[in-house]
């Protein structure tokens, strides 16, 4: 799939809201894309599910998964002086909170700004904000706010979505909407082919709060093999070469004691056979992805990770290489063609 098509797809996927536990809009958008390749696409307990490939029940059954949720915040109260207090949903870096623009999703969507003390009035050694100290300024009075917002409503960062120079793309929620796009790209590549395996596609909920959607989705699908398509750390200034991947140099294949060595090997062989660049992602224990749920599902599932390098993870300005998304889709397609 061409990078411009992937960019357009990501723009549509990242534009819609879907923080953990409130993924309805994001799931609906992803489902419309998935229906192009899996006519039976439906939403079950929030997860977007579709099937394709070899209908033979004895064929190997592969689950392709990417999580549809994003980090964000949840309204906890409205103060008497008209500010909104919040709690975190997922692992937000509190260092970036002051002066961030946000969207508050109540009975209508309204804009807000996280309160920030001007540097002129600070001593310069203030500590990082704790969430109990965070306040959001909307310009509304407390009475006006209570007609729009309620505790439990979602709050998302108002980041900018844009194609950058070359093949770079920036947006909130690229973790893990770019994984969704990579799977869709793979399905586009194999749509007219007879595959040796059955395929279940799952865009799962609540990964950022404990991989909850993956657990129930994998149990229901009962696959033989499960691939968690997620993001990992792209190298930045001063980063360790052994803990990061390079943007533009292809997907990162997971190596870990908690992952299936045979599936890792199969992914590497598929990449090498097709000339697809790939990178190592070596993890000493569990992976922090949905693969951790897959490997212990039911009687055990052969699980592995395929990761897209991403900079500035869990911020409103995540950055990826569109070429990496395309190559990840190529790798997934190559693996499905060889899966026996």
Image (cartoon, rainbow, N blue to C red):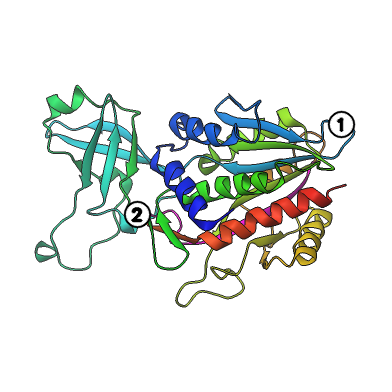
Residue 53, percent from left and from top: 77, 37
Query: What's the magenta region?
Result: 301-316
Q: Given the current orientation, which residue lies at the most extreme top position?
A: 147
Label 1 packing within 10 angstroms: few (<14), some (14-19), many (20+): few
Residue 104, percent from left and from top: 28, 36
Q: Residue at x 34, y 54 (%)?
A: 94
The answer to whether residue 301 is above or below residue 128 is: above
Query: Which secondary structure is most common in the magenta stretch?
Result: strand
State yes or no: residue 213 in magenta.
no
The residue that disc 2 covers is: 94
The Cα–Cα distance between marks 2 and 1, rounded to whole angstroms, is 50 Å
Residue 286 or residue 34, whichever sits in front: 34
Q: Secondary structure at mark 1?
A: loop
Q: Secondary structure at mark 2?
A: helix
Report if residue 258 is visible in the image.
no
The residue that disc 1 covers is: 56
Q: Is residue 224 left or right of residue 305?
A: right
The answer to whether residue 166 is above or below residue 33 is: below
Residue 215 numbered tag: none
């Amino acid at each position: 799939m061409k990078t411009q098509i992937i960019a357009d797809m990501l723009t549509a996927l990242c534009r819609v809201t879907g923080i953990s536990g409130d993924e309805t809009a994001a799931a609906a958008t992803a489902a419309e894309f998935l229906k192009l390749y899996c006519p039976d696409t439906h939403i079950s307990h929030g997860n977007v599910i579709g099937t394709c490939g070899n209908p033979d029940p004895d064929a190997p059954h592969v689950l392709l998964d990417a999580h549809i949720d994003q980090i964000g915040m949840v309204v906890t109260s409205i103060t008497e002086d008209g500010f909104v207090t919040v709690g975190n949903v997922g692992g937000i870096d509190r260092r970036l909170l002051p002066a961030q623009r946000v969207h508050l999703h109540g009975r209508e969507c309204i804009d807000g700004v996280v309160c920030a003390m001007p540097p002129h009035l600070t001593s310069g050694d203030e500590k990082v904000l704790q969430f109990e100290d965070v306040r959001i300024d909307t310009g509304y009075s407390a009475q006006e706010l209570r007609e729009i917002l309620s505790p439990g409503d979602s709050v998302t960062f108002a980041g900018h979505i844009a194609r950058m120079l070359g093949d770079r793309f920036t947006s909130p929620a690229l973790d893990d909407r770019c994984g969704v796009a990579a799977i869709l790209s793979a399905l586009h590549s194999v749509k007219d082919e007879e595959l040796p395996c059955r395929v279940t596609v799952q865009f799962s909920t609540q990964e950022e709060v404990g991989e909850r959607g993956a657990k129930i989705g994998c149990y229901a699908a009962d696959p033989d093999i499960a691939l968690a398509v997620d993001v990992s750390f792209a190298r930045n200034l001063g980063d360790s070469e052994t803990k990061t991947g390079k943007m533009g140099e292809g997907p990162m294949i997971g190596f870990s004691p908690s992952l299936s060595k045979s599936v890792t090997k199969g992914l590497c062989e598929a990449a090498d056979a097709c000339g697809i660049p790939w990178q190592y992602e070596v993890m000493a224990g569990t992976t922090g992805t949905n693969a951790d749920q897959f490997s212990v599902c039911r009687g055990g599932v052969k699980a592995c990770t395929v990761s897209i390098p991403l900079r500035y993870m869990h911020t409103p300005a995540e950055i990826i290489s569109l070429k990496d998304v395309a190559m990840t889709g190529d790798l997934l397609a190559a693996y499905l063609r060889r899966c026996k």
